[in-house]
């Protein structure tokens, strides 16, 4: 690793703080060279997420310039230099200008080569394979020992033809320690049948060990912290059950609307876009039993068991909303009933969670932007302080922004009187871990793919059960059986959603607002 570009000593220190990981960081040299292919290289996802993640991994020493080459593939007729120019601004966005950054940027861009071709014909993929092979030969890799990673930053509709072309034209020619792996982005279908059809087509081309269904929420720092919190801390073990917990909310809120993506969003809606995947994955980690080990299959087995225990969703446990002005977007049909807001209560039928509502809530054009898990505990029996009206104990995990964990609890209010007030025990990452770079989700998940670690990716049977939970509700909405309630942009959403929360047992705290601590 020390043979990397300039300033390797400083970069090594930065790397050790950025990724707290016990795995060997010298994985790149274990086999042949690594070729990373970004399909859809000229699209927004590739420019804004995939290439910046690769750049950050490069800067931290995880991608070695003497072993890694990056290929962009798309239909656009552009040159290597044009792609690099398009990427340049996205790669340095949010970073302080420095000579190191400029040098790293130049070295990284030199690794990128562009290949133009269609997604359903062999000609372009044969050319791509030749470019990859030439790179492998140049790096003195033995045939079959190199590694090929294909990132599909593409719409799901083209996954089957693209994967067919990869299988026919771009696989490793033999197995001498190398591999071929494919990352596919959500959405994985629109309902159970389409998801199963897509899984069947991809499964006919690649083994499950070669497919990495990425859900970037599983790469977020505090989502990855969930298993550590639950199973490495003794005081959570006796509390994490129906005897102590009244309800759990998993919330995603945005303070902006579809903003030019109305036509795309209208095909899916907030449940398909956020709840069925991102929030449901978080639910699995919150509710699952302790796995036998941290091996990927052991963790994913427990996630599947939780999903199999979820009861069918009842219509009375759902509130849908659509913000006023959503249909003003010219790409949205005038008669659209696509929800931009949803509250859905899931109930898990097992010994640990019987009777505890899991409240999944997501919406656009609301009064705040945040994603969090809110665990509300039951009332204290025999309330001698008469403080029940102040609110219950809550454990809140703030996923974004301002990553934090805090416990709301009741304390004596300072002074001569015996009165109570709500306060918190707070772990705010910006304050506690000053100077530590929290990696972006895509960085972590691409690194996991290179390492062959599928723990934070969605397995086929897990995907199937997730769609089984939501498909009946989604079909009812699609067929007009449930209509979204209008709500004003900048509000909390439909008032009916708050009424559903109260009905489910959630008690809102009044007079207390969590304020992220400042650094001074």
Image (cartoon, grey):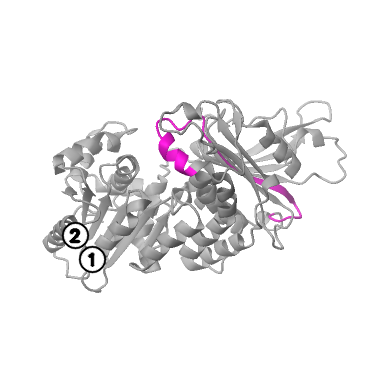
List x then y, in percent, for residue 172. Answer: 23, 68
Question: Relative to residue 231, is residue 442 drawn left or right?
Answer: left
Mark 1 Cα within 10 Å, few/some/many (few <14, many 20+)?
few
List x then y, in percent, for residue 81. Answer: 14, 40
| Residue 64 highlighted magenta (yes or no) | no
Q: Please report the residue visible at 29 percent of the width from the left and 58 percent of the height from the top.
A: 161
| Residue 248 highlighted magenta (yes or no) | yes
- Tell me the quarter of the picture where residue 303 sits: bottom right
Q: Does 19 appear above or below 407?
A: below
Q: Which numbered circle lies on residue 399?
A: none
List x then y, in percent, for residue 178. Answer: 26, 68
Q: Is residue 29 visible?
A: no
Q: Does 492 appear above or below 24?
A: above
Report if the CB atoms under discs 1 and 2 are less than 8 Å apart: yes
Q: Is residue 307 visible?
A: yes
Residue designated by label 1? 168
Sequence-earlier tag: 1 or 2? 2
- Numbered-mark total: 2
Span colored in magenta = 240-268
Q: CA distance from mark 1 to mark 2?
A: 8 Å
SS of the residue at dot 2?
Answer: helix
Q: Does 454 appear above or below 185?
A: below
- Tell me the quarter of the picture where residue 122 sits: bottom left
Q: Please report the residue visible at 71 percent of the width from the left and 56 percent of the height from the top.
A: 241
Residue designated by label 2? 122
List x then y, in percent, for residue 217. Answer: 47, 48
Q: Nearer the viewer, residue 497 or 520?
A: 497
Mark 2 Cα within 10 Å, few/some/many (few <14, many 20+)?
some
């Amino acid at each position: 690793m020390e043979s990397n570009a300039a300033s390797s000593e400083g970069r090594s220190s930065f790397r050790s703080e950025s990724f707290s990981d016990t795995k060997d960081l010298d994985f790149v040299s274990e086999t042949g060279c690594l070729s990373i292919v970004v399909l859809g290289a000229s699209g927004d996802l590739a420019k804004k997420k995939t290439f910046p993640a690769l750049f950050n991994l490069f800067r931290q020493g995880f991608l070695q310039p003497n072993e890694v080459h990056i290929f962009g593939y798309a239909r656009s007729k552009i040159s290597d230099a044009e792609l690099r120019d398009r990427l340049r601004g996205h790669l340095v966005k949010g970073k302080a200008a420095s000579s190191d950054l400029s040098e790293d940027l130049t070295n990284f861009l030199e690794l990128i080569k562009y290949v133009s071709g269609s997604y359903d014909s062999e000609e372009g993929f044969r050319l791509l394979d030749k470019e990859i092979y030439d790179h492998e030969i140049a790096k003195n890799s033995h045939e079959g020992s190199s590694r090929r990673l294909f990132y599909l930053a593409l719409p799901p509709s083209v996954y089957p033809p693209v994967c067919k072309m990869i299988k026919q034209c771009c696989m490793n020619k033999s197995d001498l320690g190398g591999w071929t792996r494919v990352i596919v982005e959500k959405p994985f279908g629109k309902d159970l049948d389409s998801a199963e059809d897509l899984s069947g087509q991809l499964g006919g081309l690649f083994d499950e060990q070669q497919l990495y269904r990425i859900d970037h929420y599983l790469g977020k720092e505090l989502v990855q912290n969930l298993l550590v919190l639950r199973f490495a801390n003794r005081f959570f073990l006796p509390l994490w059950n129906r005897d102590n917990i009244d309800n759990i909310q998993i919330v995603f809120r945005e303070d902006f609307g579809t903003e030019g993506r109305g036509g795309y969003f209208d095909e899916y809606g907030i449940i398909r876009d956020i709840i069925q995947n991102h929030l449901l994955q978080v639910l699995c980690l919150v509710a699952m039993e302790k796995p036998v080990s941290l091996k990927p299959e052991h963790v994913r087995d427990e996630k599947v068991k939780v999903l199999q225990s979820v009861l069918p969703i009842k219509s009375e446990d759902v509130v849908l909303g659509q913000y006023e002005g959503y249909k003003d977007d010219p790409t949205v049909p005038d008669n659209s009933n696509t929800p931009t807001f949803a509250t859905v209560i899931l109930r898990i039928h097992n010994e640990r969670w019987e009777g505890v509502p899991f409240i999944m809530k997501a919406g656009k054009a609301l009064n705040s932007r945040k994603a969090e898990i809110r665990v509300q505990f039951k009332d204290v029996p025999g309330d001698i302080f008469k403080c029940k009206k102040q609110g219950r104990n809550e454990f809140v995990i703030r996923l974004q922004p301002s990553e934090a964990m805090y416990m709301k609890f009741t304390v004596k209010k300072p002074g001569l009187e015996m009165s109570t007030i709500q306060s918190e025990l707070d772990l705010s990452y910006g304050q506690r871990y000053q100077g530590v770079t929290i990696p972006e989700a895509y960085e972590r998940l691409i690194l996991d793919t290179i390492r062959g670690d599928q723990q934070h990716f969605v397995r086929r049977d897990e995907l199937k059960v997730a769609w089984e939970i939501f498909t009946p509700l989604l079909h009812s909405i699609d067929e007009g059986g449930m209509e979204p309630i209008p709500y004003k942009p900048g509000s909390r959403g439909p008032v009916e959603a708050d009424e559903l929360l109260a009905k489910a047992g959630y008690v809102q705290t009044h007079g207390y607002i969590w304020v992220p601590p400042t650094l001074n």
